Image (spheres, rainbow, N blue to C red):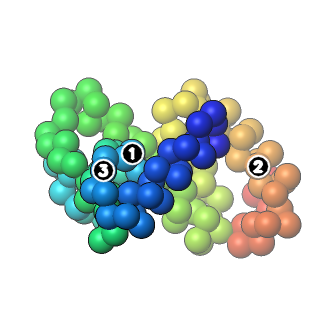
Amino acid sequence: GGAYYSDASLNLVDSIYNNRNSIHVVNVLNNGAINGLPDDAVIECSAVIGSWGAKPLAVGELSNNIKGLLHQVKAYEQLTIEAAVEGNYDKALMALTNNPLVPDIGRAKAILDELLAVNAPYLPQFKLTAL
């Protein structure tokens, strides 16, 4: 983590252990915090943390410009998970193409091919014949 990440981590553990019900930024299931996202989507948001767990603070309805980016990123994440589980090169390429930080399919293919080549021992589910 970055600077002071250990402080944030210890404060989180303290909130859980001592049931402080304090607010922390964590990754949690959406559970209705953001309208229009599935309840089982993982989001990073402010949540009340206690010994009982984490409850995300309601965000409600997002503006259309934010909603579009959020759905694009969630599509990227979901396709990445499916590609990893299935070892599906085409889904992995589609995932990277959906990533808003990847400018075009040519760059996505270059990133994916290098990632698969360098990490081949750790990704046996991928058929490397696509490279």
Mark 3, secondary structure of its residue: strand
Judge by depth and name the residue closer to the eye, 82 or 20: 20
- Nearest to the eye among marks 3 and 1: give it: 3
Q: Is residue 29 visible to us here?
A: no
Mark 1, secondary structure of its residue: strand
Amino acid type for the residue under numbered disc 2? Leu
Judge by depth and name the residue closer to the eye, 82 or 93: 82
Mark 3 highlights which residue? 22
Mark 2, secondary structure of its residue: helix
Q: Residues within 10 Å of mark 1 (few under 14, many from 20)?
A: some
Amino acid type for the residue under numbered disc 1? Val
CA–CA distance in space, label 2 to label 1? 30 Å
Q: Is residue 8 above or below residue 126?
A: above
At x 61% / y 65%, what residue is drawn? Answer: 84
Mark 2 highlights which residue? 115
At x 42% / y 43%, what residue is drawn? Answer: 73
Instruction: Determine which quarter of the picture holds residue 50.
Output: bottom left
- Locate residue 96, reporting x and y percent: 57, 44
Q: Earlier in the sequence, mark 2 or mark 3?
A: 3
Q: Is residue 4 above or below residue 51?
A: above
- Locate residue 106, reporting x and y percent: 66, 33
- Locate residue 100, reporting x and y percent: 49, 33
CA–CA distance in space, label 3 to label 1? 10 Å
At x 44% / y 58%, what residue is drawn? Answer: 14
- Nearest to the eye among marks 2 and 3: give it: 3
- Mark drawn on residue 25: 1
- Nearest to the eye among marks 2 and 1: give it: 1
Q: Is residue 102 left or right of residue 54?
A: right
